């Protein structure tokens, strides 16, 4: 798998923005990495399993 985009930043990226970037770049996966452990139950659930692959529609 080739790296299409690398972003190192402390700001949150909205899911719609990340999805648009992935679609425009033809990315096969999005990886979110943090050195801090998830602190909420929602974050823990999100980090404990991979997201399902979704088909993208074009406008």
Image: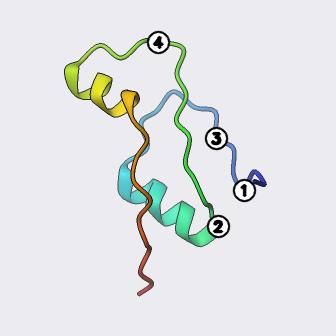
C-alpha gap between disc 3 and disc 2: 14 Å
Tell me, for residue 33, which label it has, or none: none
Residue at 69% from the left image edge and 51% from the top image edge: 5
Q: Nearer the viewer, mark 3 or mark 1?
A: 1
Give the residue pinned by disc 4: 36
Local packing at callout 2 (Cα closer than 10 Å; few below 14, some 14-19, many 20+) is few
Give the residue pinned by disc 1: 4
C-alpha gap between disc 1 and disc 2: 6 Å
Residue at 44% from the left image edge and 59% from the top image edge: 53
C-alpha gap between disc 4 and disc 2: 28 Å
Give the residue pinned by disc 2: 25
11 over 51 or under it: above or below: above
C-alpha gap between disc 3 and disc 4: 17 Å
Report the quarter where the C terminus lies: bottom left
For numbered disc 4, what is the local secondary structure?
loop
59 over 13 or under it: above or below: below
Q: Is residue 4 left or right of residue 45?
A: right
For numbered disc 3, what is the local secondary structure?
loop
Q: Kindly check if marks 4 and 1 are in contact, taking CB atoms under 8 A apart as contact.
A: no
Residue at 51% from the left image edge and 27% from the top image edge: 10
Give the residue pinned by disc 3: 7
C-alpha gap between disc 3 and disc 1: 10 Å
For numbered disc 1, what is the local secondary structure?
loop
C-alpha gap between disc 4 and disc 1: 25 Å
Local packing at callout 3 (Cα closer than 10 Å; few below 14, some 14-19, many 20+) is few
For numbered disc 2, what is the local secondary structure?
helix
């Amino acid at each position: 798998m080739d790296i299409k985009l690398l972003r190192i930043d402390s700001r949150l990226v909205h899911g719609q923005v990340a999805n648009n970037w992935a679609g425009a770049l033809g990315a096969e996966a999005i990886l979110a990495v943090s050195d801090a452990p998830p602190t909420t139950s929602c974050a823990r659930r999100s980090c404990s399993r991979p997201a399902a692959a979704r088909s993208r529609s074009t406008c």
